Amino acid sequence: KQEVTQIPAALSVPEGENLVLNCSFTDSAIYNLQWFRQDPGKGLTSLLLIQSSQREQTSGRLNASLDKSSGRSTLYIAASQPGDSATYLCAVPGNTGKLIFGQGTTLQVKP
Amino acid sequence: GAGVSQSPSNKVTEKGKDVELRCDPISGHTALYWYRQSLGQGLEFLIYFQGNSAPDKSGLPSDRFSAERTGGSVSTLTIQRTQQEDSAVYLCASTIRLAGDHEQFFGPGTRLTVL
């Protein structure tokens, strides 16, 4: 049974700092991995999707890496801003494509 | 085009009442998923539609929960005889489900409160 874990559960950093969020999964036979952002009281916004054949994906200040063999993904946020404050979730598809989510990392970037 | 939309955005109901939650997926997306996000429970899968068929209902927590999809588009999640433990945010997602492209796009959710 696939399990997804995210650490840390919460993170508070000063503005401008570079940071790394971690995601691990128990079954390395994944099709892809998706990172999401969730603002309080809102739905999920897709940030990056990494296919199993890829090592990393970049979008602006965000860079996500994937190491299937070790069951790990990281989301790197460069030069963090207060607007980056949100909960970040990673997810991998199970059978039928249903997403299996980690518990999320709640990020606070202080001005 | 427009993203995934859900209605209502908020629903407050009394214990024992039935509720219907609606999801409008992105046009052309053949696959539709329902998830539930409960306080302290994280995001849980409920049901998956491919077209109008539901090949995976494994996440529905009880027989009080049902869902349907018509015309390969709009989906309705129905909860009968609501209980307080049904209080959660219900999220819908759609994806095109072509080979190599399974990115799921989520709606804003419906926050259900059962008093």
Image: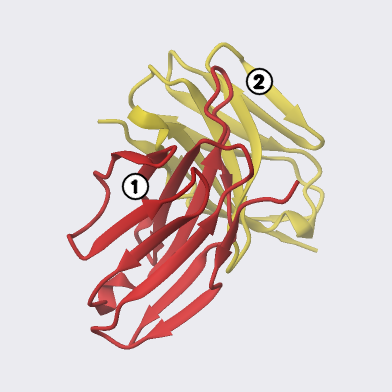
Type of amino acid at the residue the image marks with label 1: Ile
Q: List x then y, in percent, for residue B87.
A: 35, 73
Horizontally, is A75 left or right of B74 in the view? right
Q: List x then y, in percent, for residue A98.
A: 40, 37
Please give the chain letter of the residue carrying mark 2: A
Q: What residue do we see at 56% from left, 34% from top?
A: A34
Residues at badges 2 and 1 in contact (C-beta under 8 Å)? no
Q: Is residue A94 visible?
A: no
Distance between the alpha carbons at the discs numbered 2 and 1: 30 Å
Numbered mark located on residue A56 in the image: 2
Chain letter, yellow: A
Q: Quadrant of residue A77?
A: top right
Type of amino acid at the residue the image marks with label 2: Glu
Please tell me whether residue A66 is drawn above or below residue B92 in the rendered image.
above
Q: Nearer the viewer, residue B61 or A7?
A: B61
The C terminus of chain B: image quadrant: bottom left
Q: Nearer the viewer, residue B75 or A77?
A: B75
Please give the chain letter of the residue carrying mark 1: B
Residue at image mark 1: B47
Please tell me whether residue B4 is drawn above or below residue B77 in the rendered image.
above
Please tell me whether residue B66 is drawn above or below residue B58 in the rendered image.
below
Q: List x then y, in percent, for residue B88.
A: 39, 69
Colour applied to chain B: red
Q: What residue do we see at 36% from left, 75% from top?
A: B19
Horizontally, is B56 left or right of A69 in the view? left
Q: What residue do we see at 58% from left, 31% from top?
A: A74
Q: Is residue A14 visible?
A: yes
Secondary element at image label 2: strand
Q: Quadrant of residue B20?
A: bottom left
